[in-house]
Image (spheres, rainbow, N blue to C red):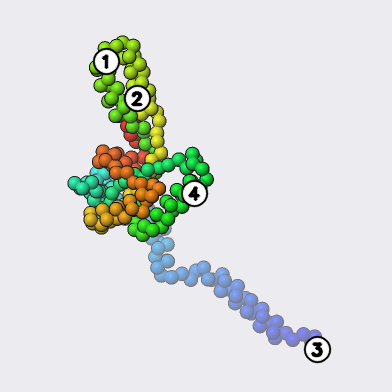
Amino acid sequence: MALFEEQPIQQHASQMKKGKKWSQEAPFFLDEKEIKTRKRSFLHPFAALREKRAKAKKEKPPQIKKLIAEIIPIVDYTESGLFQLKGEGFFDIWQIQSKDIFAMNEKEASFHIYSLASGFQSYQEAFKVVSLNLPVSTEQQQQYLEKKLERSQNLLYERFLQQKLKELQFLEWGRTNREYFVFIYGKTELMVKERREDLIRYLQRTTPLIEVNDKKKIELIYKLYNQNAKLGNKQ
């Protein structure tokens, strides 16, 4: 008499054999597409590479914009002193009169800070504050000294004026000022002007806005799109 039943053991062994058989035969059962691709790669090893190169030739390379006018969003500078954007919209640039809060006492400094914050909170429209290091402008002082040199007849006085003129030229060449500007946006020129008046009214208590001339506006735009450029006489 057998101690164990032989039938389940035989069934288990037959299942193991079937599993091994299927596992050995499984790699040879492939789809028709995969068989075709393998045959093609075996018979023509460079066909796939040629197809990739042909596709690359068909794809057009990206067009490189040749003119700076195609890159920057500014289209024109209007007679009223506003910059016109592509599509629709205008913007204006005004300068913020900065103050040295470290030279004030604690009450004055906190008053200016909180007044500026409340002014920005009261103004609901979109604007942008930009800070730049710009060269010190001594053009008017230099013109004044040059006129004095032309009229002067005293050699000692001329030497003194020449020394002062060199100092002003050095300041313009080697020194910069931290200046702050606000960009005001609008869909129309009238909207920009109205928003500008509102912002001037909100900030006039502590930080009044200063009008920027046309030459300086163009220099600011040039500096923003050419950040490595040096303005003024600094070369």
Q: CA distance from mark 1 to mark 2?
A: 20 Å
Kind of residue at disc 4: Ser
Secondary structure under badge 1?
loop
Instruction: Residue under label 3, please give it.
Output: 1
Q: CA distance from mark 4 to mark 3?
A: 105 Å
For the question of whether residue 45 can be seen, the reply is no
**Callouts 2 and 4 close, C-beta under 8 Å:** no
- Under circle 4, the secondary element is helix
Amino acid type of disc 2?
A: Gln
Spatial CA span between label 2 and label 4: 37 Å
Give the labeled residue for mark 4. 110
Check disc 3 and give the amino acid type. Met
> Compared to 55, does 4 lie above or below?
below
- Label 1 sits on residue: 152
* Residue 185: image location, x then y, percent: 30, 54
Badge 4 or badge 3: first in the primary sequence: 3
Q: Which residue is mark 2?
A: 169
Residues tagged 1 and 3 counted as in contact (Cβ below 8 A): no
Mark 2 or mark 3: name the one nearer the start of the chain.
3
